[in-house]
Image: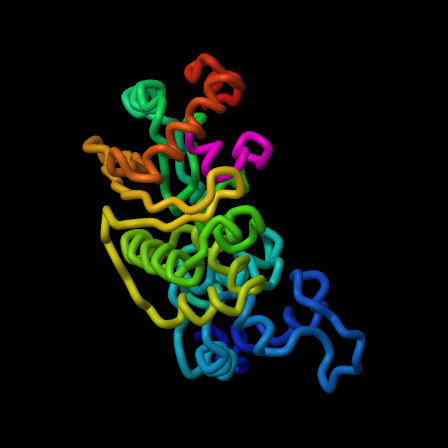
Amino acid sequence: MSSSPGHPNELGDFLKARRADLTPREVGLPDNGTSRRVRGLRREEVAQTAAISVDYLTRLEQGRVRASASVLVTLARALRLDDDQRTYLYELAGKVPAGPTRKRAQRVRPAMRRLLDQLTETPALVLGRRMDILAWNAGAAALYTDFAKIPADRRNYLRLLFTDPVMRALHPEWADAARTAVASLRMEAARDPEDPELALLVGELSVQDPDFRTWWASHRVTSSSYGTKHYHHPLVGPLVLDCDTWASPDGSEQRLMVLTAEPGTPSYEALRILASWTAEASPDDSRYERKHGL
């Protein structure tokens, strides 16, 4: 793994040295203050933060396996490497240093924006890569949460499902909903496994939530674009809604997610009530969206 015959496992030495320089608090892990047998982070903690297995990290540090480019991305983030350290890591691994890989900023397509404007009694979202929430109408804000109050770089459907108390409480069958969402993200990961923003999201949720770690490690996948969602809204009570998702035909990876109820059902009437309250608070949906930069 190294060009230097005197140091056949410089990559492993570098990884061990770097994790020895970090503390749990620096990477967002709890530190109970107890003494440690080794300085810095344990292998288990680095593996957890990087969303890889302990066994894989052990073999990597021992020089028994080669790291893929996607693993190098997650390790560089987990170990808080600066630019020089990151370049050095790639050179030791025999990989071309990854340049700026951030994709072009996601912007809502005009056609998607028009659809949101026209769905006045139907909650709808536009989802981008990694299930980022790119836009929403007033009905979606009334159903879920006030997305405008969430910083744009934190506005991710899966992140909110796991970390936002309001979103969690909305789902009476939260475990099923969250597990399905993880399977959808896992499917997307196969299409772009070296996306650094995806690696960051997976690492963050792996650290924060044991359920996410378990479900992500299970490698369950789904490409389902429709189904039934159950909610318990604090204002209108139980809701049973059909969820349909349509992919944009232009390859932009944007999807329109629409939630509807069968006419004549309690859920249908509840959505009408939410829509009427929303109309009173914001009579012009398009103005509402422009105000929030949608």
Instruction: Classify the position of the N terminus by image quarter.
Output: bottom left
49 lies above or below 82: below
Front residue of 202 and 242 = 242
In the image, what residue occupies the spot 43% across and 17% down? 285
104 lies above or below 225: above
Query: Which residue reaches farthest left?
Result: 249
Question: Measured from the top left, where is residue 115 in percent x and y?
Answer: 29, 23
In the image, what residue occupies the spot 58% across and 71% down? 46
Question: Measured from the top left, where is residue 256 in percent x and y?
Answer: 30, 34
Front residue of 186 and 5 = 186
Instruction: Classify the position of the C terminus by image quarter.
Output: top left
In the image, what residue occupies the spot 51% across and 53% down? 168
Magenta region, residue range: 139-152
Question: Measured from the top left, where is residue 110 in percent x and y?
Answer: 32, 19
In the image, what residue occupies the spot 23% across and 53% down? 223
Please, which colouring scheme is shown? Answer: rainbow
Residue 150 magenta: yes
User: Could you tell whether 212 is left or right of 15 in the image?
Assistant: left
Residue 49 magenta: no
Q: Quadrant location of residue 260?
A: top left
